[in-house]
Amino acid sequence: MGRFLTDSIQIGRPFQYALVYRHQPTEEVLFPDTAIHFAPYQVRQVTTFPTTTTGTLPDIISRDSAVYTLISFETTSAQVLQVPIRIVRDADCTLIMTQPDTIFLRTSIAANAADTTGVASTTLATHTELIQLRQQFNYPILVAVVTGLSMLLGLLYLLFGRWISRKIRLYQLYLRHMRFQRNYNQLIRTLNAETATTTTSQAIVIWKEYLGRLEGQSFASLTTTEIAERIADERVVDALREADRVIYGGAFSVQSQPALRLLRDVATQTYRRQRAALLASTSSKHSDGPTDSSSPTASTQLSVPS
């Protein structure tokens, strides 16, 4: 006798099937092969019990039994199982089939309330509403991209870092010089007797700030006498004194504009010298810094165009 121990099952959920056979004690019984005779079910576990013999002669009876734990993935609503039992004889085996037993598939999908027959409708919906799903950020891809870019930038820096740094510094130096030239020349062009004091004062402030930045020193707070002590060129000193006469005495003359042009040329020549020094220091393979070993407090020597 074979029967299911439950009347309904769910797909993928284990259930049990019990098999019991009573026979004469002298008979040898073979239960069904779990790999063949339980299809389409999958046998998860088999629990066997020792043979028990009861009664007295001539009514003595032996009983063999086993419980099979099965799993079904079939979608048929009613499923039937019938397995064979073999009685071993001297010459061959006698095949005995168990009575078929039926088990029903239990569905988790509720039937339509309007369907009085209890049969789920198979009509597809013609109108549906889309549900906006929240986008999830792909962090593994972000980490991979950031890591790859970091490695690429690091490699580029190792290969071209010095060259790129030199180009940036040269470009910044060039932009500052162009800005100085534009502002300073605009003041020189508008220089006249009426605006001489204000224009000359602005020009000297721009010149001191730019020259001090080029030389790495502070010229903005220095007086003409203090600058003269640092610059060993009488023409630059004379040009600064001419600017002082215009600023503090209002003494505008024909020498005022040439004096400002001389100071502009001094700044331009200093820019060219600093640019050449930057090219020489960054292109050197044996030094990472400037080759000038002079003290930063030493007096600045400016070569002035004649």
Image (spheres, grey):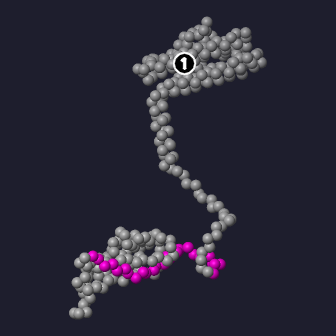
Q: Which residue is mark 1?
A: 275
- In the rendering, at what x and y percent does residue 86 appear? 31, 77
In the rendered structure, the answer to whether residue 224 lies left or right of residue 197 reads left
Q: Residue furthest right?
A: 194
From the viewer's perspective, is residue 135 above or below residue 34?
A: above
Left or right of 280 in this view: 82: left
For residue 197: magenta?
no
Q: Quadrant of residue 95?
A: bottom left
Viewport quadrant of the N terminus? bottom left
- Name the element at disc 1: helix
Image height check: is 53 above or below 33?
below
Of 58 and 147, the residue lying toward us:
58
Q: Which residues are magenta?
A: 92-116
Q: Quadrant of the C terminus?
A: top right
Q: Nearer the viewer, residue 273 or 49?
A: 49
Judged from this view, the residue extending furthest toward the front is 91
Q: Residue at x 47, y 20 (%)?
A: 283
Taking the image as shown, residue 152 lies to the left or right of residue 194, namely left
Q: Which residue is pictured at 57% across the width and 75% down the height? A: 110
Q: Amino acid at mark 1?
A: Arg
Mark 1 Cα shell of 10 Å, populated few (<14), some (14-19), many (≥20)? some
Left or right for 73, reference 85: right
Q: Is residue 103 magenta?
A: yes
